[in-house]
Image (spheres, rainbow, N blue to C red):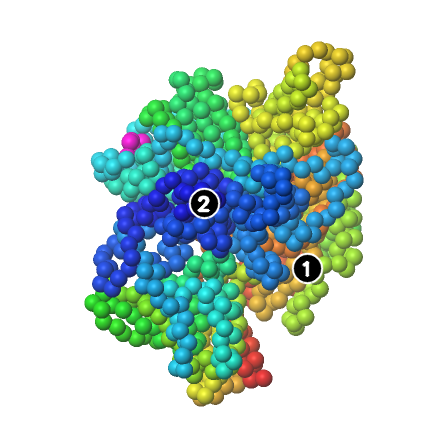
Amino acid sequence: MDLGTVEEFVPARVGAWQAGDAWLAGGTWLFSEPQPHLRRLLDLQAFGWPALTAGADGLEIAATCTLAELARFAAPAEWPAAALIGPCCAALLGSFKVRSTATVGGNLCMSLPAGPMTALTAALDGVCTLWAADGSVREVEVAAFVTGNGSNVLRPGELLRSVRIPAAALRSRTAFRRASLTPHGRSAAVVIGRTGSDGAVLTVTASTVRPLQLRFDRLPGAADLAAALETAGPTWHDDVHGLPSWRRHMTGLLAEDVRAELAR
Amino acid sequence: MIVNGRAAARVPAPGQCLRTHLREEGWFGVKKGCDTGDCGACTVRVDGEPVHSCIYPARRAVGRTVTTIEGLAAADLVAKPASGDPAELHPVQQCFLDTQGFQCGFCTAGMVMTAASLPPEQAADLPEALKGNLCRCTGYRPIADAVGGTAPPPPPDTGPVGSDVPAPAGPDIVTGRARFTLDVEVPGLLHAALLRSPHASAWIRSIDPTGALAVPGVVTVLTWEDAPPVAYSTARHEHIEDDPDDTLLFDRTVRFAGQRVAAVVAETRAAAEEGCRRLVVDYEVRPAVLDPRAALAPGAPLVHGDKVDRAAAARIFDPGHNTAARISSRIGDLAAGLAEAAATVELSFGVQRVQHVSLETHAAIAWPDGDGVVVRSSTQVPFLTRDALCRLFDLPRNAVRVVTGRIGGGFGGKQEMFTEDVVTLAALRTGRPVQLEFTREEQFTATSTRHPMEITVRAGADRSGALTALEVRVLANTGAYGNHGPGVLFHACGESIALYTCPVKHVEAVSAYTHTVPAGAFRGYGLSQTAFAIESTLDELARRLDLDPVELRRRNVVRPGDPLVSIVGDHSDVGLHSYGLDECIDRVQAALDDGRGEPLPEEPGWLVGRGVGITMLDSSPPGGHVATTRLVRDTDGTVTLFVGTAEFGNGTTTVHAQLAAAALGVSPESVRVVSSDTALVEHDTGAFGSTGTMVAGAATLRAAEAMAELVRLGTPGRLETEGRADGTPRTAAFAVHGLRVAVRPDTGEIRILRSVQAVDAGTVINPRQLRGQVQGGAAQALGAALYEHVDVDDRGLVTTRTLRDYHVPAFGDLPPTEVLFARTDDPLGPLGAKPMSEAPFNPVAPALANAVRDATGVRLTRLPFTADRVHAALRTGDEPASGSAGLPVLPHARHLHEQPLGAEPAH
């Protein structure tokens, strides 16, 4: 929709942010809701960041990398966990026409429980690189970056530069399960499991208000996994896309499915 | 920016989305449906990539190449044929035309742009590829045929009637040339925006417009001080007495959160919106009542307490008790009937608010014209709106002209005056043309919904299954205004009850005012709610008697010659002039028996069941429904038909051309149909109540038959005839839906394995269009039964405000519905036809509930059946009454007995 209060569309640069500004990545969320507090859009495309940089230590995904670009990533055979990219991109409620514009960084910064890039990058132990308005840089794990339904650790004027996925995580085996009230609807529960040299990790998103990660030395049995979920006691998300009790139940079912697949 | 090979003339504004920029450039094929990237009606290509242009920053497209529907054929047809015909269609456009893959056509440009951009691997998974393209009319089957190239072969040409004549607007729709309401360039156009109340109940002490008037571009501010002191109803009916005069254009009293408080009129939409934000309104917040039961309780805050002393003049049933309408009807001795029964069942049901979600929102433009106005509006009722504007502004009939363009869907939502009054006031005040376009959010928060209802049904039958007693209690929530409140309540207690023969029928029904968004006319007009309750109860009753649920109903349905009885003194002009119900039931049962459809899922834990819903619909609203048409045959032989009824995807334009052609002995393509302009014919009640064929079609047929007679007599020169129909006496149509479903109790998931609907529509004038109406109605009903709910929070605010939070069925959500036609011929309908616009909606929800009951043994009574709620209900036997689904808490049946709805409230 039109953002009638926006007066300027300017290239983004570090230190440029002021009150009434918004970083513009793909714009697919920003232009989907009224934003009467905004006066300027700071266009992140001006930085010209390469979308994807693969190296020995892992994969760096620029905040401005679109979901479509990520989905086209041709991963080396030693990174089987890249198989998660496809289903996670498809889990976006928006269509392929949104995925061609929506960005990984934008999805993370929205910090919605159902955010599929949160699910993907948290499950693979991604680390966010944040640029502050004063030029300083800090790193935050994705699982800690999102702090609640629509909230995160970003400070005013700070921007998400990229997410780095460590090679160790990319080398792990993974399993993905998702539940939604409708066949192609918004995710109500997403459970991703992975097993690798560092043990087993189960990541729950969408059903919880923020990512939940359970770490095990090795793949647990069904009862141990259920007990660990119970003990973790996350805050179950409540909105029109699923009752909390159902999300909790579905998370248990999906988690066991994921465990069983990884045990095979 | 190069658009369709032409450089754009304007530089987009910094915050503008690409859609608006393209429309400003005159590319009106790019539609505004949701404005949030969910519906896909705005799909265009940027550098060859399809995008939702409503969420694409226009500035990003500067320097790029943009293709809209208008440029699609040229962009993709590299090797043009030698003729170089500019009317050349893209192959996908041709497919949509061949399959008639549209009804209203508002989504079509976006569908075509998307389908034409799919590589083969994506085209193989259409549910995924089309999840961002919503169609509210068709149920997606003809779209699947168009995209997949799987159109069924056309039936043999049987002449004008009974053949698949394509819609005359088809070529314009698939190319984006069709002009919907706002697809016009208007020099000097002003834009209005509405400030809406954040409070459910309040008194406006004052409105300070100073800040708004200081915004550059703001022309004027209109508030309660500017509104005519004439009370009216937004609902439009042939007789204005059908609805209470409880509404003012702007009212100092706020009765729901979302009610208009003021309009700001400005040179741009952005300035008008900014003006709204700068208005300072001093509200005195008052107590609100949101629940209909609480509203009827003694001492409840009164929604229209200011009208208690003039209730009769305003035709408000009982504003002193928040009552918009009441029915208390007792036929037979209930206690005796129940005592006679071998089994009785009593169940309480909850039916939720749903929204029409026509893809084109409410919108209008008014031009000053002499002492009056011309209004171009998205309305199902141009003539009644003209009459209402004349009354409201004290203008003579010839001073107001209302016209429509093509209308992007209605479903009952546009049988209201929500925009025309504002733009008329603004145009009269400013002397300039003024446009008002509702946002998608306003559609949800401030227009109308289906009436939410709580319904208790008690039924008894003897050992053979013959009904001995039927009691129906209804509590409807009409919201803050009584638009359609009485009509919907009476209709809800009409055909659903009259369908069954039973010596004892008791009805107690109330429509309560609450401080919530008004309910209004919605496809089915009350029947979908009571049909769900009654069909579910009778299914349960059969199970108690160990009888087949369909056979019990078959034993009790009305037959030709039976009186149609629902409440005392109703249905006097309705009769079963044709009867295909038995055939519909037989064919649905046979289809469910034939083993076709999807197999039961292979994973363990799925249960399977089948269910049927049976419904009847009178052929037009009671009290008369008038249509006049005018047919002109020029000296060169060209035939032009002027009709008043509106085309919003219902296909009546095609049917009118077919009816006229049949009488004149010409081809339907040779009849030009001009519709929906108050200047062209005398009167038309409007396109509602499923009357486009039954009533307006009858008028057309009469005009054409008169013309044929003149031609036969060899009358020379230009010929003109008129036809008129008044919608009485009436007949009845039937729709029977059958479903086979799989239910997985451990997840709450329901999968539809087979969906079939048999309809008794009399003579089928256009099989493809009729099939489309049925598939579309079933699709909308499946959405309402499985997914959709408008939620209101404990402050009275609507919380489901976008299409991503209000789930309209997408391509992948719907099963194919097989459509079967009963072979009947009605003596009242034009060439034997009966109406079938609303009827297909009504039997679907009870068919689903009955199928789930069959599969699981659990009776679900509260719609919708979303997986989370079904899971809870199957696990505990208790359907959640609040939380994300937001349904009101329903009292137990016993409570209803303690407080009979029909009795005067105790106080």
Q: Above or below — where is A217 with respect to B905?
A: below
Residue type at mark 2: give it.
Val
User: Which residue: 48% across, 51% down?
Assistant: B45
**Residue position marked by numbered label 1 in the rendering:** B753
User: Which residue: 22% across, 38% down?
Assistant: B211
Front-most of B898 and B624?
A: B624
Q: Main secondary structure of the magenta part?
A: strand
Give SS at disc 2. strand
**Residue position marked by numbered label 2 in the rendering:** B3
Q: Above or below — where is B667 with respect to B813?
A: above
Spot occupied by residue A25 in the image (x, y as percentages of width and height): 36, 60
Give SS at disc 1. strand
Disc 2: which chain? Answer: B
Mark 1–mark 2 distance (CA, rounded to whole Å): 45 Å
Residue B370: quadrant of the picture: top left
- Closest to the camera, between mark 1 and mark 2, is 2
Query: Quick check: B406 left or right of B614?
Result: left
Front-most of B656 and B478?
A: B656
Residue lying farthest to the top in this orientation: B716
Q: Above or below — where is B251 with respect to B444?
A: above
Q: Which residues are magenta?
A: B218-223
